[in-house]
Image (cartoon, helix red, strand yellow):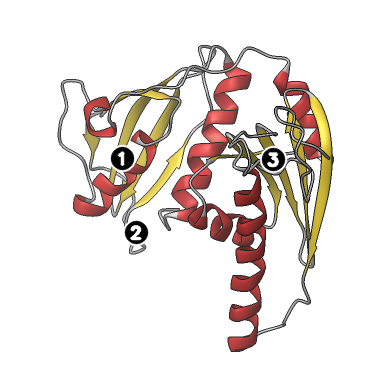
Amino acid sequence: MECGRCGSPLDRPGDYCLVCHTGNCDAVVLDVATDRATLTMLDDESVLGETTITTRPEEEGRSRVVERRNFAGLIADEIQRKRPETVFAAGDREIIRAVRAETHYEFYRVAGEDPVATVLERRGERALEVVETAPKEKLGGRHTTLIGGRTGRRAISTVAEHPHVKKIVPGPIDAGGTGSQSGLRAKVTRADGNGNVRLLLRDGSSVQENRIVTTAMDRETGERVRDDLNEELDAADLQ
């Protein structure tokens, strides 16, 4: 493959051109299995090619930790070669979380047996607005108290950092629930018809439902934001 701007040869499909400093793909679809990961490079709605990275899975112990870390590192390095705007990921959640931690690109999970086809279907749709407001400025409403102390604030911050979250409106605290010893847990509930969701915080017998205003335009796109948020909360060990 050659660079679309200067014509310089590229080692792999979708590589960033180091000659004219130009990106050649705007998205990477990452499909991760236990022993291999397939990266498909996209430019708009065109498939530029794919790269496969393999590993030999270890069963347990220190060897497994090292193998998983190295596998995630190889995937992250390959994504860095492309410098895409967005990464869409499907498959092994453990590896996806590790790759996400090593990269600085927008990361979204996709579902379905064919993640590339799913992403291509979405690409023809109107893109969701990206919110530039600082996360701490997204919090508003009459109620300012959050349950869970520092952990509750971390859950709110995790949600506020999402680029498609416009505003978080904390709700009243209900202290009449059933007690739990598991500490604070956070979960984003199903989207409404306008694409907005709710963040449910539960800490012991206290429950707080917080309204999340998103840039989604309907229930379907709101569900995608919901999936992203729950993935973020899970990665932060808040679920």
Tell us which disc is closer to us: 3 or 1: 3
Residue drawn at x 76%, y 65% is 34
> Disc 3 designates what residue?
28
- The quadrant in which residue 41 appears is top right
Q: CA distance from mark 3 to mark 2?
A: 41 Å
Q: Which amino acid type is marked by label 2?
A: Ser
Residue drawn at x 82%, y 57% is 52
> Disc 1 designates what residue?
156
Query: As drawn, is 24 to the left or to the right of 47?
Result: left
Query: As drawn, is 42 to the left or to the right of 87?
Result: right
Quarter in which the N terminus is drawn: top right
Q: Which mark is residue 180?
A: 2
Q: Earlier in the sequence, mark 1 or mark 2?
A: 1
Task: Pick the residue in front: 82 or 37.
Answer: 82
Query: Where does the image place residue 149, in percent across and percent down from the top left?
Result: 19, 51
SS type, badge 2: loop
SS type, badge 3: strand
Q: Earlier in the sequence, mark 3 or mark 1?
A: 3
- The quadrant in which residue 139 appears is top left
Task: Pick the residue in front: 219 or 231.
Answer: 231
Residue drawn at x 61%, y 55% is 96
SS type, badge 1: helix
Q: Which amino acid type is marked by label 3?
A: Val
Query: Where does the image place residue 158, in percent across and percent down from the top left?
Result: 36, 43
Q: Which amino acid type is marked by label 1?
A: Ile
